[in-house]
Image (tube, rainbow, N blue to C red):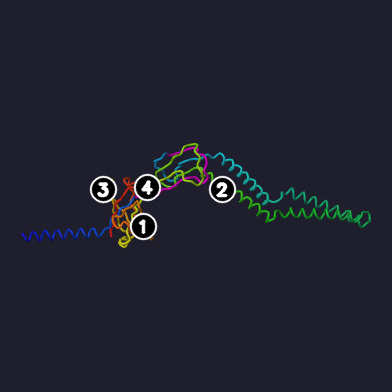
Amino acid sequence: MLVAILLAASAAGAAYWLLSRRKSDELAFSGTIEARDAEVGSLVGGRIAAVEVDEGATVKKGQVLVILESDLLDHQVLEQKGRVAQQQANLDKTVNGPRREEVARARATWENAERERRRLEALLKEGVIGQDQYDTAATTARTSKEAFDELNRGSRPEDIKQARASLESEKSALAYLLRQKEELTVRAPADGVIQSMDLRPGDLVVPNEGIIKILEPKEIWVRVYVPEPQLGFVQRGAPVTFTVDTFPHRTFSGKVVEIRPQSEYTPRNIQTLDQRGDQVFGVKVAIEPAAELKPGMAALVRIHR
């Protein structure tokens, strides 16, 4: 009888030791499942022409969500394309320089003016005409020669640079308008689920404001708050298991990926298992996405040491 009692006591002690050791090898905290979301909108705003998805729909990255009216911007784009074409023609004209016919005409004008100068020079020597008449002819010949030389040399490098700069400026303005036109089509920035949206054709949306909220189910984690005395037992990369109230008998896995460097007071919407009034450190636990796990679910997290 005594032996049986001793054996039972020994077994109970062993069980208690194993249970104590198991409990000491893990830390349990209450947390909430969170997921990354995105506020999607337009940089330009405008009137909605079409809504391509419904609230709750699953969307892929790049999928069209909303289309805004483009008629006003189309006119600006068309006008700006005309300015670009005009500056391109001006640059081509400047680079090519004067036409051969213009150069030939300037040469002929100079040669005629030079012949007239020589004729009047001879008359001046004979005393037939006065100095003033000759000086006028000489000036005409000289200016005609300068005009011919200018055309013959072609465009100045400064004129070409100026024409090219004007063209680049107009191209930049066109690129800005085309970028604005792209913003008239609102697309999904990532795979996700439309969480909230209240839009219909004809509605007006303002620039730089979110109009659709997309939840990214693949970017999901649990946030728990660890009291300062227990923080030393939590390490990045530590394995984690957790359960949710909806599936109490199913265990999900994850790992610690972030420990906030600064402490904070226990948030009102989170309750740690003990020392609720102490300062705590936020710990982010990455988890494997699963259809059963929804943002906002309460989770009991066990961090294994």
Marks 3 and 4 sit apart, C-alpha to C-alpha, by 21 Å
Q: Please tell me whether mark 3 sits on a helix, a strand or a loop.
A: strand
Q: Amino acid at mark 4?
A: Pro
Marks 2 and 4 sit apart, C-alpha to C-alpha, by 34 Å
**Sequence-first disc among 3 and 1:** 3
Q: Please tell me whether mark 1 sits on a helix, a strand or a loop.
A: strand
Magenta extent = 33-53
Residue that appears at 80% across and 54% down: 143
Check residue 265 in the rendering and tell me which mark sits there, or answer none: 1
Q: Nearer the viewer, mark 3 or mark 4?
A: 3
Q: Amino acid at mark 1?
A: Tyr
Looking at this view, name the residue that lies furthest to the front: 277
Marks 2 and 3 sit apart, C-alpha to C-alpha, by 55 Å
- Tell me where residue 54 appears, x and y as whole percent: 42, 39
Marks 1 and 4 sit apart, C-alpha to C-alpha, by 29 Å
Residue with the mark numbered 4: 217
Q: Which image quadrant: the C terminus?
A: bottom left
Q: Left or right of 113: which side holds 101?
A: left
Marks 2 and 1 sit apart, C-alpha to C-alpha, by 47 Å
**Which quadrant of the figure has residue 134?**
bottom right
Q: Could you tell me if the residues under marks 3 and 4 are in contact, i.e. CB atoms within 8 Å?
A: no
Q: Nearer the viewer, mark 2 or mark 3?
A: 3
Is 50 magenta? The answer is yes
Check residue 176 in the rendering and tell me which mark sits there, or answer none: 2
Q: Nearer the viewer, mark 1 or mark 4?
A: 1
Q: Could you tell me if the residues under marks 2 and 4 are in contact, i.e. CB atoms within 8 Å?
A: no
Looking at this view, name the residue that lies furthest to the top: 201
Q: Please tell me whether mark 2 sits on a helix, a strand or a loop.
A: helix
Residue with the mark numbered 3: 248
